[in-house]
Amino acid sequence: MITTMKIIYNPSSNLKLLQYGIQIPVTDFRDELIAKAMSSKEIPVEVIKQKLNQLSLDDLTRVHQSSFIERLQSESSLIEEIMTCFELINPDGSYNRYDPSRATAPITELYECVIQKIETAYYASQYCLKGENAFLLGGGFHHAMSFGGRGFCLLNDGVIVLEKLRSLNKIKNAWIIDVDAHKGDGSAELTANNPYISTLSIHMKNGWPLVTGPLDSDKKLYPWYIPSTIDIEMEMGQEAQYMHRLQRGLEQLKAATAKPDMAIIVLGADPYELDELPSSSKLNLTLPQMLQRDQLVAEFLAKEGIPALYLMGGGYGVHSHEPYVQFLNKVFDK
């Protein structure tokens, strides 16, 4: 199915939200659980033991608005951006899924974890330049938009990595294939006028972020409704159609765009029926269906000779590691 796959793990980039007092049902040790599962099967995992320093502020402002990146450099405005991104404040000013009294580390440290995750994604992308596939334990911050973070995604790692590679003339064209339960709205917004990066997103039709209606009070399109190159909207109860529609979407992407030098896959685990995030509940694939999904994408890219960088995307609760473990076991025939 896949000739080569490098698994990359950076322990210093784990987004352990509970240590910052954030009560979102992300298993803090999801990345670590997968790494341990691979080790138990003697599947090689490359562990990054040093701090990576390959990205500059210019790499961030190439994708995001400079005013937003400037706000992330100030402690007070960084805290505000994190609170907004992770939806920690209710309209009345009270905390939402946030208890600072339970924090064991300052919330500002979350920024460096995000930066290290993006650094590691860029590191992993170097394997794709050699024609190999890479699987990053973490990442997939597909909701972050030009003007700020949203949906637990502070910065858009996928687009940052691709635009960094393009700036160095390492690649020309690329795909982002997003199979997370939620629309890859940030990736769509950031690449809407980019002829070199094409996006496909298969997601819940009426699930977050598509819950506001497309137009604001001034009749302007909300940015989360900006279309991907290919959008596949799944309604509740359509799980039996999922694979057929995904296959057809991939064929449409191939027909509509130039062959990419590489693809980034946002391999969200939140369509899994045991996912614990309420906003993922409108799409419920079984564990065998999750494996079928992942193999479908991998085999399509392998057939086309397109190297892929896998980012994990969403996945919430105690079962969130299971789809990834079964996919990697299949890749390595374990």
Image (cartoon, rainbow, N blue to C red):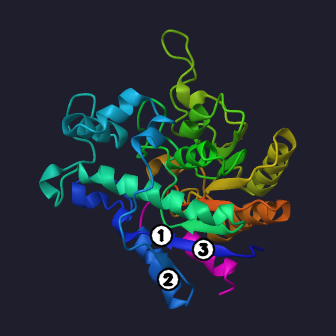
Residue found at x 43% / y 72%: 48
The verdict on residue 331 being magenta is yes
**Percent x, y for residue 301?**
78, 60
> Could you tell me residue 171's position as x and y percent?
69, 49
Whether tag 3 and tag 2 are in contact, CB under 8 A, the answer is no
User: Label 1, on which residue?
Assistant: 319
Q: What's the residue type where badge 2 is placed?
A: Ala
Q: Secondary structure at mark 2?
A: helix
- Residue sitting at the far right: 255
Disc 1 residue type (three-letter) = His
Q: Earlier in the sequence, mark 3 or mark 2?
A: 3
Q: Which mark is residue 213?
A: none
Does 41 sit above or below residue 61?
below
Question: How far is the residue under mark 3 from the one under mark 2?
Answer: 15 Å
10 Å neighbourhood of mark 1: few (<14), some, or many (≥20)? some
- Tell us which disc is closer to us: 1 or 2: 2
Region of the chain picked out in magenta, as a range:
316-334
**Residue plotted at (50% across, 16% down):** 216
Q: Which is more N-terminal, label 1 or label 3? A: 3
Q: How many residues crowd mark 3 within 10 Å: few (<14), some (14–19), many (20+)?
A: some
Seen from the viewer's position, the closer of residues 156 and 169 is 169
- Which residue is label 3 attached to? 6
- The reply to whether residue 175 is visible in this rendering is yes
Q: Nearer the viewer, residue 278 or 80?
A: 80
Q: Label 2: which residue?
A: 37
Task: Tell me which amino acid carries mark 3.
Answer: Lys
Note whether residue 272 is visible.
Answer: no
Is residue 310 left or right of 90 when viewed as pictured?
A: right
Residue 188 coordinates in the image, percent (x, y): 61, 36
Q: Residue at x 79, y 50 (%)?
A: 250
